[in-house]
Image (tube, rainbow, N blue to C red):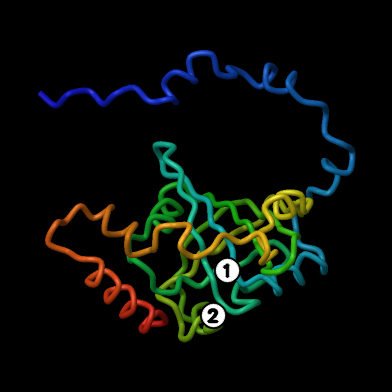
Amino acid sequence: MTPAPAASAFDELRLDAVSDQEELRRAYELPSDAAVRKQMTELTEQTRRLIGCSSLVLVATVDASGNCDVSPRGGPAGFVAVLDARTVAIPDATGNKRLDSLQNVVGTGRAGLLFVIPGRTTTLRVNGRACVSTRPDLLSQLTAVGKPPASALVLGIEEVYPHCPKALLRSGAWDPEQWLPADAQPTSAEVTLAQLRMPELTIADIEQAEADSLKYRYE
């Protein structure tokens, strides 16, 4: 019989964790009127422009069992197409082919997006219904990442919310003086090698595989 996994810090902390929304609300002040009012159900001219400036969007999805996933999507500024005031489309450039996000969307029909603009502290949250489209006339418009994608994640907007810049200001994400030196973290190859748990592989093997993958990143 496989032994039960050892208890984690989470198992201990959940014993007296917040148990309902009323208890949670008591720990905070009420949001300001502006924080509530600025949530909208469609894009304005200004939020369209923000999306047009974004070269990075984080895609949050969940499967039918409630398992969550957040995955980055990147391309040149404006690679996410605004189809109308309530619809955006993200081309699916070839990645690891696991299809975690797309399978979740097919299963639940929901997604959340967080648009990020490098060098700027404004972010834009867009949530709503979602589907995966392989319609040729749509895909032919979505060539910003090199060629028409195999599919596109299409989001039907239900919530548009511009975030205040506090998180990015606190993080110093765009301030080079706050950046860690390269040797302060494990390299991508080191992380991958540990994750794979395959003794026959070396760092050099992983580095070569990563280099090859990046060379053909648009294919």
Identify the residue position indicated by label 2 in the image: 142
User: Quick one: 38 or 196, which is closer to the camera?
Assistant: 196
Identify the residue position indicated by label 1 in the image: 89
Give the structural element (helix, strand or loop) at label 1.
Answer: strand
Query: Residue reaching furthest top?
Result: 16
Q: Quadrant of the C terminus?
A: bottom left
| CA–CA distance in space, label 1 to label 2 | 8 Å
Question: Label 1: few (<14), some or many (≥20) within 10 Å?
Answer: many
Marks 1 and 2: CB-CB under 8 Å? yes
Q: Earlier in the sequence, mark 1 or mark 2?
A: 1
* Location of residue 165 by image quarter: bottom right
Identify the amino acid type marked 2: Leu
* Location of residue 55 by image quarter: bottom right
Q: Position of residue 172 (x, y in %)?
A: 69, 57
Q: Quadrant of the N terminus?
A: top left
Q: Residue at x 36, y 83 (%)?
A: 216
- How many numbered discs? 2
Residue 14 placement, left or right of 191: right
